[in-house]
């Protein structure tokens, strides 16, 4: 019969076997971890010692039957760096200012006067025209004859004249002031801040000759800019005439006048001037003179026409820091 000591010895034997199994498992885990660690270190060292793969042979290279591996070098073992697709930029070659050859044709073709003309932009006060000069023929002369509200403006209107009187500095007669004077010298003597130019009616009375007129007009603007540096020049559109005028003066066809106005707008673009389409105030949409403004010859205008002309100029002026507006300036941000 088993007694207490027998069972005690049996339990102690089971406990020793259990502890031995646990210890064996711990030793096996440690051995596996150590084996894994040494294997990882071994593979890492072998990978670092192996040479980098040689690049594929280019078409120019001669293949061999038994190619030998290229030994590892510091360059081949260096980390990969992306190849630059574009060449390095030489800052010294572009970071400078110098004249370059013109490669684009800047000539304006098929200019539409309506698209070039100054838009309506507020109404300047009459003081704006105190330092303005009006240059032109007998149509401009009316600015000095009728009350337009521009009492202090200088008017140089020479009858039956064209742009050649400025180019040649010809001596002409000013009937409004009853003086003979050299046209260019007289304009320069006024020392204007703003110059309004209107020529063309006399040059177009007969058919043909518009090419010569445009050539003289362009040269006139060049001469004026040379003698009046910094002065804002406003090229004004040639106003239309009554439909019946073409019967006695074939050159004054309103359709032809519009074509010439397109050419004048082109001059304004190329010469850096302003183009003022006064036809909007003085003619119907077809280009003919508004009946309310007509005179006996169907070319010149009555006082109502000049009042409308003056009002149009006051509301179609380019921004200038010296401008004074009636009411709020439409350019108050620029003028601040």
Image: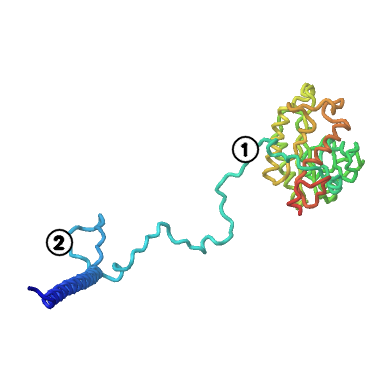
| Residue identifier under label 1 | 109
The location of residue 325, given as percent across then percent down, is 82, 46
Q: In front of the other: label 2 or label 1?
A: 2
Q: Can the viewer see residue 182 in this picture?
A: no
Residue 297, disc: none
Badge 2: few (under 14), some or many (20 or more) residues near its Cα, within 10 Å? few
Question: Is 283 rendered above or below residue 51?
Answer: above
Which residue was labeled with disc 2?
A: 66
Circle nearer the N terminus (2, 1): 2
Helix, strand or loop at disc 1? loop
x and y, in percent, of residue 262 in the image: 69, 35
Pick out the residue farthest to the right: 178
| Mark 1 Cα shell of 10 Å, populated few (<14), some (14-19), many (≥20) | few
Q: Secondary structure at mark 2?
A: loop
Estimate the spatial distance between the alpha carbons at disc 2 and disc 1, rounded to whole Å: 72 Å
Seen in the picture, residue 236 relative to 36 is either above or below; the reply is above
């Amino acid at each position: 019969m088993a007694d207490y000591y027998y069972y005690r010895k049996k339990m102690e034997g089971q406990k020793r076997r259990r502890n031995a199994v646990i210890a064996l498992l711990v030793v096996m885990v440690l051995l596996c971890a150590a084996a894994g660690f040494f294997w990882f270190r071994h593979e890492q060292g072998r990978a670092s010692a192996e040479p980098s793969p040689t690049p594929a042979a280019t078409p120019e290279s001669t293949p061999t039957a038994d190619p030998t591996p290229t030994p590892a070098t510091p360059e081949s073992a260096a980390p990969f760096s992306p190849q630059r697709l574009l060449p390095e930029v030489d800052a010294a070659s572009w970071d400078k200012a110098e004249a370059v050859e013109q490669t684009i044709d800047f000539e304006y073709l098929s200019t539409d006067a309506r698209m070039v003309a100054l838009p309506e932009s507020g109404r300047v006060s009459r003081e704006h025209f105190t330092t303005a000069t009006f240059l032109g023929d007998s149509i401009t002369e009316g600015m000095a004859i009728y009350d337009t509200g521009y009492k202090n403006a200088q008017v140089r209107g020479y009858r039956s004249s064209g742009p050649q009187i400025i180019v040649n500095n010809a001596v002409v007669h000013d009937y409004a002031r009853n003086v003979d004077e050299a046209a260019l010298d007289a304009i320069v003597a006024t020392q204007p801040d703003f110059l309004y130019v209107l020529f063309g009616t006399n040059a177009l009375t007969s058919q043909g000759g518009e090419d010569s007129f445009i050539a003289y007009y362009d040269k006139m603007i060049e001469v004026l800019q040379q003698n009046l540096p910094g002065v804002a020049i406003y090229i004004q559109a040639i106003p239309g005439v009554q439909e019946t005028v073409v019967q006695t003066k074939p050159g004054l066809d309103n359709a032809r006048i519009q074509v010439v106005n397109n050419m004048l707008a082109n001059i304004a673009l190329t010469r850096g001037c302003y183009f003022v389409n006064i036809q909007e105030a003085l003619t119907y949409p077809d280009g003919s003179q508004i009946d309310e403004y007509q005179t006996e010859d169907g070319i010149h205008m009555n006082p109502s026409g000049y009042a409308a002309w003056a009002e149009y100029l006051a509301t179609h002026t380019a921004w200038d820091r010296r401008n004074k507006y009636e009411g709020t300036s439409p350019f108050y941000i620029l003028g601040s």
